[in-house]
Image: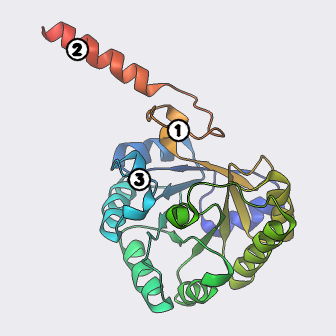
Amino acid sequence: MLHSLHDLRQRKAQAQRLSVLTAYDYPCARLLDEAGIDLILVGDSLGMVVLGLPDTTGVTLADMVHHLKAVRRGVKRAPVIGDLPYHTYDTPAEAVKNARLLMDAGADAVKLEGGLALIPQVRAIIGAGIPFIGHIGMLPQSVIEEGGYKKKGRTPEGAAHLMADARALDEAGAMACVLESIVPEVATQITAAVQMSTIGIGAGPHCDGQVLVTPDLLGSFPWFRPPFAKARADLATETLRAVREYITAVQ
């Protein structure tokens, strides 16, 4: 089990894979922590799987602070990462101010989406003493501009751009980086090229760790599940059964 973000490089050197899941509330966070998960991400994915929004762009900083506080109350051991939501890091000064708000709410590190273009913000966050996690590849906060969710790294130019993003984040001092919906071969190359830990989601099995949205893992959000997410439970069906049993008992 990972007890500190400072153990990440040792884990990478020892080829010990990282297990990462999302949490948005106290009971889920506490269960993940007690189960021994390495890292907990309070992701802006809460916009869809908790708040019912069509994508992550409607998530506010107040939403993130609210859910981070709930998660923090449930976690005693695993480091907690907080997402900076859409348009909360447009400038370096804004990035630092809002990163501090997430840290005050209970985050141990903050994450934002983007590579080379966001290096001034990344350097400002790290320079302020705030541990930083990157996120490259498919960027959910850019889904409207890009017209959907698209696999990244399919062309030589795309692969080179992703490698440049990863190297820039690594050199800036990122502790880890999420690689989302990246061609597995490219994700493998990035993992070998950087000192930071890579955490894959839809990027093949050869990253330093894997992250999933917990409702996808538990089968508790049946209306949509990405093709790469293997459900290891079916809580939606079990919930329907229990509720219908209760209704019958009451009637």
In the rendered structure, find residue 112 and report the number of the disc placed on it: none
The residue tagged with tag 1: helix, strand or loop? Answer: helix
Q: Amino acid at mark 3?
A: Leu
According to the image, label 3 marks what residue? 46
Number of numbered callouts drawn: 3
Local crowd size for mark 1, using a 10 Å CA cut-off: few (<14), some (14–19), many (≥20): many
* Extreme-left residue of the structure: 251
Image position, residue 56 (x, y; %): 44, 59
Q: Residues under labels 1 and 3: Cα distance?
A: 12 Å
According to the image, label 2 marks what residue? 246
Local crowd size for mark 2, using a 10 Å CA cut-off: few (<14), some (14–19), many (≥20): few
The residue tagged with tag 2: helix, strand or loop? Answer: helix
Indicate whether 112 appears above or below 227: below
Q: Residue at x 82, y 54 (%)?
A: 15
Foreground disc of the pair 1, 2? 1
Local crowd size for mark 3, using a 10 Å CA cut-off: few (<14), some (14–19), many (≥20): many
